[in-house]
Amino acid sequence: MNYNLTHIGSINKVYGAHGGLACYFKDDTYESLVKPNTFIFLEIDGYHVPFMIVKIEFARTVIIFLEGVNSPEKASTYRQSDLFLASNQLSELPVSNLETEVCFVHYQVFDAKNNKVGIINEIIETDYSTTAIVARNGKDIFLPIHQDIILDIDHKQKVLQLEIVDGILDL
C-alpha cells in the first residue's frame, strides 16, 4: 500500500532494558497521535518501514515500544531514525492544533468525490470557528474548516480533502 507520509520527528536514544525508544517530535501536537495499536513509520536505509506501537510511556520525553523490538540491542539499530505518520492520521488532530494559518494557506481543496474546489488564500480564525477563503472560478468562497469534515490531508502535495455540505459552493 502506498502511504502519504508526514515527517513528525526522530528517535533520540534507547530507553531502558526492554527496547524503548525516546522520541523527539517537531511539534508537540504530534504526540497525541502516537498511541498504542497504531502504526508509525521509521526511515531505515531510505525506506519507510511500518512498526506497530505496542506501548507508550511518558518520562521527560515520549518513550515508544515497537512490536518486535524488545531489547536495547535491537532498539539501538533504530537510533537517530526519522519518524513518520500516515498523513491521514493527521486529520485526527483538532483543527486548532494544526496551526491552520500556516498549514492550509495555498493548499488545494478537493471535495469527497475528489473534485477540485479551489485554492485556499486565507484562513480566518475566531473563538468559535475556522473558515477558509477559497479562490474558485474567479470568486472567493467561504468554507468552514473543522476536524469532523476533514477527510484527508496531504502536506507534501498541499492538498486538503473536505466533506463539503451540499449547496455551499453555490452561495
Image (spheres, rainbow, N blue to C red):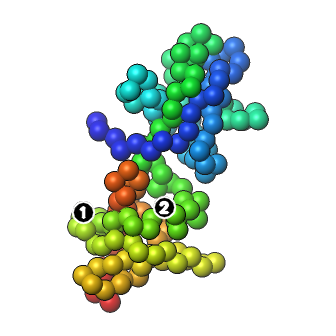
Dot 1, how many residues are within 10 Å of its Cα: few (below 14), some (14-19), or many (20+)? few
Left or right position of 26 against 123 = right
- Residue of label 2: 103
At a point 45% along the width and 65% down the height, the residue shown is 104
Measured as percent of width and height from the top left, residue 128 is found at 60, 78
Return the mark for residue 170.
Answer: none
At a point 29% along the width and 67% down the height, the residue shown is 111
Q: In which quarter of the image is residue 93?
A: bottom right
Q: How far apart are marks 1 and 2 (CA)?
A: 20 Å
Left or right position of 29 against 119 = right
Secondary structure of the residue carrying numbered label 1: loop
Q: What residue type is labelled 2?
A: Cys
At a point 37% along the width and 77% down the height, the residue shown is 134
Instruction: Pick the residue in front: 104 or 17.
Output: 104
Mark in the foreground, 1 or 2? 2
- Residue of label 1: 114
Q: Which residue lies furthest to the right in this view?
A: 60
Instruction: Pick the residue in front: 128 or 116.
Output: 116
Secondary structure of the residue carrying numbered label 2: helix
Q: Which amino acid does label 1 sit on?
A: Asn
88 above or below 148?
above
Dot 2, how many residues are within 10 Å of its Cα: few (below 14), some (14-19), or many (20+)? few
At a point 32% along the width and 89% down the height, the residue shown is 171
Mark 1 or mark 2, earlier in chain: 2
Residue 152 in sight from this viewpoint: no
Measured as percent of width and height from the top left, residue 168 is found at 34, 83
44 above or below 147?
above
Q: Residue furthest bottom?
A: 171
